[in-house]
């Protein structure tokens, strides 16, 4: 496709100007954005390291748990693997800076000078050739005007020489314009090729990074996923421990207190010397109770129902089970270096563990601190609390406690558990059955949780209070 030399010249000049006014400033902006890209990736890798350090810390805490030990190890392994991925990403962007951003920055500064000088050289040479051609054409016009006179034949030879010169200059000018346009277009393409090649290299680096990251993560990913596939699975040793706890019932605190205070424990031997007698001991009664006080049996005239009688009897038997004689000190006593003796101040309460006197000594436990030891009999006097001796009083007390419990149940709101956060979210809520409905105080019934309501709203229940003592307590 042939084009006018002037159009080709305009294309050449526009190509140079495009490189200098658009491409090179674009590269400068690209260098700035590339450096910001590096800073962002550096900040991201730093945040990633901090994040996975926290994951590793949680894994260390989980590794202490007897049931989550394996999951804690998995969390620490995940943290280490992702740290390796972050290191690979850092290496990739070091190469990105070294092979792309630094090269673009260096090439841009050099290219601005080179393209400016090349474009000026093209313009000056084009102007010089155009001026020479214009001068030859002007000389030819002058020669033709002179040859229009009488002696026209003598100018023919010179005209032919000028025509040949002008033709040669026009040919050279067209060749120069074509070569200059080709050079300008090639220079432009070289720059775009350089830019594309550098980004292809970076793309290869990123592909290599992703391959390494995939290899690092997929190496243990199936085993990690397998460890958390069943959240309800418990190690065998933990199951054995739980089963052992189920099979070996733990005694209640009441029984532990009774066992701890029982006579089965072997006390230290009594002091060999007879206990000293206080000179003021005769002012107090020294009748120490030997056996716990038991309530007197009731006659057949007591009108109580069977359930109240059984509950009252159980309460009385429970009190008799743990009741032991107690004494109150009337003088202070110091044990000194003898560890088998008991030190106390006046007015303290001692529970007798051995109710038989031995040479004026008694063995008991100080209630304020639980210390045990031998102490003189004459330093204390019997101590007793008001004992319920009437079974009717016990029944009334039981009835009063039951009414208080019913009032507390009226005031206490039921505690409803929210759905588990880590449960199966895809499980659809089941339709409430008649068994799951709650009877309200007005006689109506409704399900505890309605589909459109608040699942955490509580329904206040009002239990029915009956005067029939034989009715079961709900």
Image (cartoon, rainbow, N blue to C red):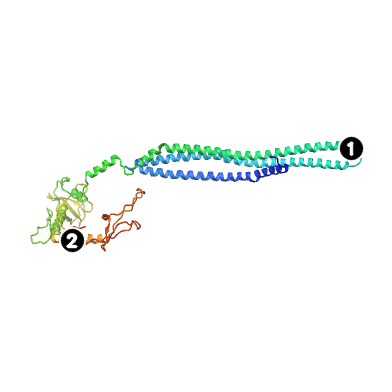
For marks 1 and 2, the one nearer the N-term is: 1
* Label 2 sits on residue: 399
Answer with left or right where residue 289 lies relative to residue 236.
Answer: left
Q: Nearer the viewer, residue 143 or 289?
A: 143
**Residue that lies at the very extreme toward the front in this rendered image:** 1
Among all residues in the image, which is located at the extreme left? 300
Corner quadrant of residue 151: top right
Q: Quadrant of residue 32?
A: top right
Depth check: 73 or 321 in front?
73
Instruction: Give above or below for 217 relative to 400.
Output: above
Q: Which mark is residue 153?
A: 1
Which residue lies at the image location 28% right of the left edge and 41% below the top edge? 238
Residue 280 vs 265, above or below: the answer is below
* Residue at 40% across, 37% down: 220
For the point 83% across and 41% down, the residue is: 140
Whether residue 73 is visible = no
User: Which SS class for mark 2?
Assistant: helix
Query: Nearest the camera: 366 or 142?
Result: 142
* Residue at 84% over, 36% down: 160
Instruction: Categorize mark 2 by other alpha carbons within 10 Å: few (<14), some (14-19), many (20+).
Output: some
Q: Quadrant of the N terminus?
A: top right
**Numbered circle sitting on residue 28:** none
Secondary structure beneath label 1: helix
């Amino acid at each position: 496709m042939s084009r006018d030399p002037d159009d080709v010249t305009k294309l050449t000049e526009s190509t140079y100007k495009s490189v200098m006014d658009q491409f090179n400033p674009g590269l400068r902006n690209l260098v700035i954005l590339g450096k910001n890209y590096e800073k962002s990736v550096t900040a991201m890798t730093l945040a990633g390291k901090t994040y996975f350090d926290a994951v590793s810390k949680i894994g260390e805490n989980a590794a202490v748990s007897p049931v989550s030990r394996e999951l804690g190890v998995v969390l620490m392994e995940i943290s280490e693997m992702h740290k390796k991925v972050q290191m690979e990403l850092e290496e990739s962007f070091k190469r990105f800076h070294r092979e792309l951003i630094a090269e673009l920055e260096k090439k841009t500064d050099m290219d601005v000078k080179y393209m400016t000088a090349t474009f000026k050289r093209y313009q000056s040479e084009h102007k010089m050739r155009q001026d020479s051609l214009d001068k030859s054409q002007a000389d030819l016009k002058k020669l033709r005007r002179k040859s229009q006179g009488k002696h026209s034949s003598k100018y023919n030879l010179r005209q032919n020489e000028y025509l040949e010169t002008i033709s040669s200059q026009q040919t050279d000018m067209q060749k120069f314009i074509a070569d200059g346009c080709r050079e300008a277009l090639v220079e432009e393409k070289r720059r775009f090729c350089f830019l594309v090649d550098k980004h292809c290299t970076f793309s290869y680096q990123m592909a290599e990074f992703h391959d390494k990251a995939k290899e690092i993560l997929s190496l243990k990913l199936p085993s990690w996923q397998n460890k958390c596939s069943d959240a309800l699975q418990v190690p065998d040793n933990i199951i054995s421990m739980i089963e052992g706890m189920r099979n070996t019932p733990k005694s209640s605190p009441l029984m532990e207190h009774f066992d701890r205070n029982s006579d089965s424990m072997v006390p230290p031997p009594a002091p060999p010397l007879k206990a000293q007698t206080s000179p003021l001991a005769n002012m107090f009664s020294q009748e120490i109770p030997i056996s716990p006080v038991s309530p007197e049996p009731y006659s057949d005239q007591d009108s109580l129902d069977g359930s109240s009688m059984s509950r009252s009897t159980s309460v009385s038997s429970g009190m008799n089970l743990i009741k032991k004689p107690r004494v109150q000190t009337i003088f202070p006593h110091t044990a000194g270096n003898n560890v088998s003796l008991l030190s106390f101040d006046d007015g303290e309460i001692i529970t007798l563990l051995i109710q038989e006197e031995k040479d004026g000594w008694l063995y008991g436990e100080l209630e304020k601190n639980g210390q045990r030891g031998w102490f003189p009999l004459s330093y204390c006097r019997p101590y007793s609390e008001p004992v319920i001796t009437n079974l009717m009083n016990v029944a009334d007390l039981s009835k009063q406690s039951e009414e208080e419990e019913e009032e507390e149940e009226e005031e206490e709101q039921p505690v409803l558990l929210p759905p588990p956060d880590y449960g199966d979210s895809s499980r659809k809520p089941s339709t409430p059955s008649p068994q799951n409905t709650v009877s309200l105080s007005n006689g109506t019934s409704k399900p505890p949780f309605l589909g459109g309501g608040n699942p955490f709203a509580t329904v206040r229940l009002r239990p029915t209070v009956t005067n029939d003592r034989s009715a079961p307590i709900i």
